[in-house]
Image (cartoon, grey):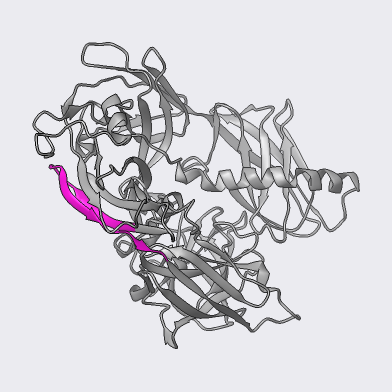
Amino acid sequence: MKLSSTNTSMKLNSLCLVLLSASLVAQVAGNAAGRPASRAVIEGIVTREPGSEPVKKALIELIAENQAEGGDYTAVSGPDGGFRIEGIVPGRYHLFAERTGLLEVDKHHARADGRVLTLAAGQEVKDLRIRLQAAAVVRGRVTDEDGDPLPNAQVAVLRQTFASGHSRWEQAGAERTNDLGEYRVAGLAAGNYYVSVSPPPDFKSLIEGAGVAADTHKGGAPDNSAATSYQTTYYPGTADRSQASPVQLHAGDDFPVNFSLTPGPSLSIRGSVVNLPPRSSAVIMLQSRDFSLVLNGAEMHPDGSFVIRDVAPGAYTILATVENAPVPMMARQALQVVSNSVEDLRLSPQPGGWIHGRLRLEGKSGGRFDPTQIFLTLRSADGDDEALSEFTMGNGFSHLAHVAADGTFEWKSVPPGTYYVQFAGEGSTPYSPTGGNADWYLKSVAAGGRDVGDAGISVNGGAAVLDLVASANGGVVEGVVADSKGEPVANAVVVAVPEMRLRARAERYRKTVSDQSGRFTLHGVVPGEYTVLTWESVEGEAYYNPEFLKNYEGQGSGMRVSEGERKSVQVNVIPESDERP
């Protein structure tokens, strides 16, 4: 089946590149006017490891963590590897370096999120050293059972990580085979990976996807007796993902992985869409909950039936979106495929819900505050936000709701499910979710006079009216990350973990990274009990997983944070050698 998602681990880099392109004109104008004394300066050198050879023509990017206050800046390293950036607005930044075929590394791993720098007015940070390392490559050839090339097969290089606390298979790179069956996936950091190949589209499936049912007995019953096809195969040659062998890549590796595909029993999902409005149809899509990927699905046949072929065992969410209906309609259902095909699945689409209401602001000092600087997001309690975004793109639903000047907001055509409201601000980033409104937090969520902040908002059509209160008096936790010798640790991951009953709620956590002096600040902390934990590195978002956190009981700093309170703490870092999967 065709993959249609990109590598989620590079989201911050993608965001940075978008923000960079929008800021270049402003930066050039600022530099032409001269450098104010209140601005900061950084300079350093880019080297290739091992050997510390200078790297020229490396693109250096300095991306403001708070886009509402800071700017973005670039430089290119010279023949000696040196670079310098002047006229920097004070604030917190992420520093990146890019060069084709090379990746930035530190002593532990590739730097996906860059390094964090806190820059004060007039400060000059010198002697920065950025180390790059040759990226690895996976290449090979895909053939059929006769040894003939299989063009247009998709080869994916995967790694296991955590997204929102759940174990996920993440795509680190992918490429389709050419007419010779050859592929090459480049730009990979050192580490352990799994390699898979998905076969090219099958003409029979394409014909049936157009609405022609080709595999029926007399009387219309499906015939699965001889259903075979090429299957998604994992290195070294198994269709069972649990039997796949990891490939360990080192810097600069050129690792060959060849596949020979043979037809095997094909699993499928068959069902029907019911209770549709007249003259409407539905599109059925499948999302893998193991991979956080959206997979190709099928169109509904005229009789309401559908079939999704070549489904690998795993956990899925299946969705049906209705076309040509008077109002947007959708059905969504969790599904587990084991060793047999799924038969007689019934999907009954329902109209989307309408969530609307008003946001009130309290505790803002320094004059009037513009609510339009705020937006709200709906987060699915099922964790399938990515799938919903793709499936509902043309149906009028968006997770994002901007707040109007009078405080009103709305979400239209909300698919059935349970949701939490999350508060964000203009210029937000993964490390500064409230953007320029650093100390704001969502204080209460009420529907019909009842608090639903912890239970979530249940949607199954109809309307829900919310009364939201946001406060500018979020708690602040600041401090220093130190190692066993008491020395400050830069670029450590700092997480304020809420009390046990709230650990399934990602919006109740606060995360940041320590700067070059080991210092950190967590803003907008919702009042409550917390444990502050710090790691030299963490795999993805494992800290959202309660089972993962059990490994570190007693290793953090516990505290209670009240509204508007400011706490100071020194936290001992958990070394990488002590981290557990």
What residue is at 18 percent from the left and 24 percent from the top? 263
What residue is at 17 percent from the left and 32 percent from the top? 215
> On the picture, is 34 further left or further right than 332?
right
Between 500 and 457, the one nearer to me in the picture: 457
Between 140 and 318, the one nearer to me in the picture: 318
Single out the residue that lies furthest toward the bottom: 449
| Visible residue check, residue 362 | yes
> On the picture, is 380 further left or further right than 243?
right
Instruction: Report which quarter residue 145 is drawn in.
Output: top left
Residue 301 on image: x %, y %: 28, 42
Instruction: Report which quarter residue 53 is drawn in.
Output: top right
Between 478 and 394, the one nearer to me in the picture: 394
Single out the residue that lies furthest toward the right: 33
Specify start and end residues of the magenta stretch as a single range. Answer: 331-352
| In the image, residue 478 above or below residue 314 | below
Residue 306 on image: x %, y %: 25, 43
Residue 345 on image: x %, y %: 19, 52
| Visible residue check, residue 114 | no
Tell me how many marks there are. Answer: 0
What residue is at 31 percent from the left and 56 percent from the top? 276
**Residue 346 is a magenta residue:** yes
**Residue 544 is a magenta residue:** no
Quadrant holding the N terminus: top left
Instruction: Report which quarter residue 463 is drawn in.
Output: bottom left
> On the picture, is 213 further left or further right than 543?
left
Dominant secondary structure of the residues highlighted in magenta in the image: strand
Residue 144 on image: x %, y %: 25, 16
What residue is at 39 percent from the left and 36 percent from the top? 191
> On the picture, is 255 further left or further right than 336?
right
| In the image, residue 93 above or below residue 498 | above
| In the image, residue 191 above or below residue 516 | above
